Amino acid sequence: MNAATSAPASATASNARRAGMAMAAAGAILFSAKAILAKLQYRYGVDSLQVLALRMAFSLPLFAALGIRETHRARARKALPSRRDLGWIVILGVLGYYLSSLLDFWGLEYVPVSLERLILFLNPTIVLLIGLFAFKRKVAGKEWIALAVSYAGVVLVMVENLRVQGDHVLFGSALVLGAAISYALYLAMSGELIKRLGTMQLVAYAMIVSTIAVMTHYLIARDPAALFGLPWQVYALAAANAVFCTFLPVTFTMAAVARLGAGTAAQFSVIGPVSLVFLGAWVLGEKITLIQLIGTAVVLGGVVLLSRPGANSVPLPSSSK
């Protein structure tokens, strides 16, 4: 390849990288903003189950269309899921997008959005601990340091929120931590399926399963009529949550991974908790204290340490059998 042909190729690669960075940043901010929209809906007298049911109902047509497209593509390359794969998709859909979302929105009734996003941002550390206890994975020294730093930051912010807002923060934090654990289990268990089916196909199918689970839960627990006749603002916020904070972040993130690689794209997730601290103050009037800012910086520092390529440096011992 001569200089004349390499220059356009280099420019194309540079443009793709810039586009990937913009998509990764936008995805992180939009996905974090779902907590803001949920908090705004709560002001109209709805609860977490109603907010979740409306979010999933509005996002279902989008993910169904994505699922149809991915099914056609999978059929063309003969990569349709097996019955065993479908069973795992049901389990992952319930764990990753039903139980996790239910606990998350429930927790948001009790904690500020800045603390909610910070606890959810512990996902990489929880995945690491799952690997340690469930799969006997070896943990490097840098990873232990990152774990300690991350959880110290969350404790710092939680103590400050207890001082400012009261004891209900503990209950809400426990719910959000449950959401983080549920989603971490989804991440830890989805690796092989992603290799076989691809990320978009798995996400589309899992979201459809989750929607069915949410609606089944709602029909068992509540009168379906309670979803109708709500203030129009509730439906507008639910539609915005479905489109801008659920479907678009997923597609943006996947597009970013295609352009940057998974590791680089993941680095941009740190923007989410930082943006939410200031969005919560601006939109919801939540207080920002110096201790909260310090705690947020500490957590982000720990997760950045954990996501560096050199951190995961201790492999599992090879089998001697």
Image (tube, rainbow, N blue to C red):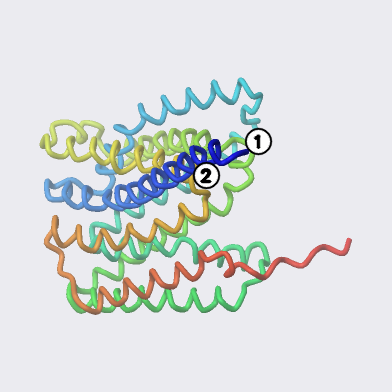
Q: Could you say which quadrant of the image residue 110 lies in?
A: bottom left
Amino acid found under the numbered disc labelled 1 = Arg
Give the x, y percent position of residue 122: 43, 65
Query: In the image, what residue occupies the spot 59% across and 26% down?
Result: 74
In what element is the residue under mark 1?
A: helix
Q: Could you say which quadrant of the image residue 135 lies in?
A: bottom right
Give the x, y percent position of residue 317: 77, 67
Q: Is residue 205 left or right of residue 157?
A: right
Label whose residue precedes the other's in the sequence (2 or 1):
1
Mark 2 and mark 1: span between their CA atoms? 12 Å
**Residue of label 2:** 92
Q: Is residue 108 left or right of residue 267?
A: left
Q: For this rendering, which residue is in front, 93 or 319?
A: 319
Q: For this rendering, which residue is in front, 23 or 199?
A: 23
Q: Could you say which quadrant of the image residue 138 lies in?
A: bottom right
In what element is the residue under mark 2?
A: helix
| Local crowd size for mark 2, using a 10 Å CA cut-off: few (<14), some (14–19), many (≥20) | many
Q: Is residue 8 left or right of residue 40?
A: right
| Local crowd size for mark 1, using a 10 Å CA cut-off: few (<14), some (14–19), many (≥20) | few
| Residue 32, numbered circle | none
Extreme residue in the front direction: 3
Give the x, y percent position of residue 120: 38, 60
| Residue 84, numbered circle | 1
Image quadrant holding the C terminus, namely: bottom right
Image quadrant holding the N terminus, namely: top right
